[in-house]
Every structure is written in C-alpha cells, then in structure tokens.
Image (spheres, grey):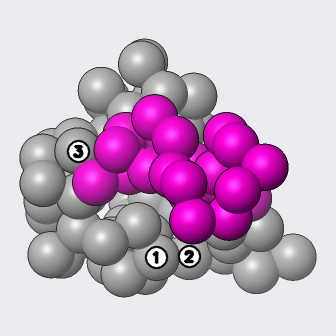
C-alpha cells in the first residue's frame, strides 16, 4: 500500500499545489466523497494512493456509452481543479 502527501494528491487531481488541494479538501470530502486521509497520520496528512486514483477515475468516467461524450463528473473534476 502506497501513501501520498497533499502535494502528490494535488498532482493527481489537477490542483496547482498541495496548498490549493488542502483548501478545497473539506468541500471535496463533504460534497464529492473524496477519500479521507489516513487517521494515524496527523502531519503531514497522507492518503492511500489507490483510493485517490480510484476517486479520480470515477470523476472522469463518462456517463454515456459514447466515449466522446463527457458527463457531469468530468465537469465536477474541472470545478475541483479550479477551486
């Protein structure tokens, strides 16, 4: 099992840096079921890499059978990146 920091999560999710991700983190957890950090890691916070990559995959998965038609999840990930 691999654990990653906020900077790593930012790189996987499209945020500019770890600080930008940490600012958006409460909203992502509350509104979009973003994985919680490991409870035993207080500083620095760490996440399971497989949980984060699975979340990203779900956000980018088209909701249509047509692979060229994105769904609301694609828009959601773009909004998260701009936050």
**Counting residues from the N terminus, which is met first, the one under dot 3 or under dot 1?**
1
Closer to the camera: disc 3 or disc 2?
A: 3
The stretch in magenta equals 54-78
Q: Residues within 10 Å of mark 1 (few under 14, many from 20)?
A: few
Tell me the quadrant of the picture where the N terminus can be found: bottom right
**For discs 3 and 1, the disc positioned in front in the rendered view:** 3
Residue topped by disc 1:
12
Q: x, y (%) of residue 29?
A: 46, 29
Pointer 2: what residue?
Answer: 4
Residue 59 lies within the magenta run: yes
User: Which residue occupies the extreme top position in the image?
Assistant: 30
Residue of label 3: 79
Residue 46 visible to an observer of this rendering: yes
Q: Secondary structure at mark 2?
A: strand
**Which quadrant holds residue 21?**
bottom left
Percent across and percent down for residue 56 are 58, 59
**In this image, 21 relative to 29: left or right?**
left
Q: Quadrant of residue 54?
A: bottom right
User: Can you see residue 57?
Assistant: no
Which residue is found at the position 42% from the left and 19% from the top?
Answer: 31
Circle 1: element type: helix
Counting residues from the start of the chain, the first of labels 1 and 2 encountered is 2
Between residue 68 and residue 12, name the one nearer to us: 68
Tell me the residue at 57%/65% (across/down).
68
Side (left or right) of 1 relative to 9: right
């Amino acid at each position: 099992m691999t654990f990653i920091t906020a900077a790593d999560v930012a790189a996987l999710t499209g945020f500019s840096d770890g600080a930008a991700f940490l600012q958006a983190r409460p909203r992502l957890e509350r509104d979009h079921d973003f994985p919680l950090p490991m409870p035993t890691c207080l500083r620095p916070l760490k996440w399971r890499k497989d949980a984060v990559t699975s979340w990203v995959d779900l956000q980018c998965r088209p909701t249509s059978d047509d692979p060229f038609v994105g769904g609301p999840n694609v828009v959601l990930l773009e909004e998260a990146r701009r936050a």
